[in-house]
Amino acid sequence: MKDIFERVGHISDVMKNFSNKDKLAILCFLWNDEKNVSEIMNCSNVSQSQISQYLWKMKLEWILKSEKKWKEVFYKISDEKVLDLISCMKNIFGK
């Protein structure tokens, strides 16, 4: 029974990211490619500090992973289930 609550907790954490329009936009932007903070900023109206906070939190939740290349950090979706959810949403709601 404890396992169910742990899984539901993880699902709830993932879904919270889908209920925030800025986080959802970031996830959709990262759906098929890795990006750095500057690239994400250029496609949103969100401040650099807010984007960094979102990325940091999603990384703590194991939704994203990061990789440092030279002086920049690139972010990518690490959870296959999140990729599947975004794909389903794109199919349902259009691209």
Image (tube, rainbow, N blue to C red):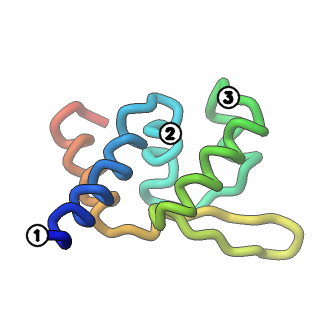
| Total numbered badges shown on the rendered structure | 3
Which mark is on residue 90? none
CA distance separating discs 1 and 2: 31 Å
Q: CA distance from mark 1 to mark 3?
A: 40 Å
> Which amino acid lies under the numbered mark 1 shown in the image of this protein?
Met
Q: Residue furthest top?
A: 45
**Toward the viewer: 1 or 80?**
1
Toward which corner of the image does residue 18 lie, by quadrant? top left
How many neighbours does mark 2 have within 10 angstroms: few (below 14), some (14-19), or many (20 or more)? some
Q: Is residue 54 left or right of residue 38?
A: left
Q: Which residue is mark 1?
A: 1
Q: Quadrant of residue 63?
A: bottom left
Select label 1 or label 3 by which is in front.
1
Give the SS element for disc 3: loop
- Amino acid type of the residue tagged 3 in the rendering: Val
Query: Which circle marks residue 46 in the picture?
Result: 3
> In the displayed structure, does residue 92 sit left or right of residue 52?
left
| Residue for badge 2 | 23
Percent from the top left, x then y, of residue 91? 19, 42
Question: SS class of the residue under badge 1?
Answer: loop
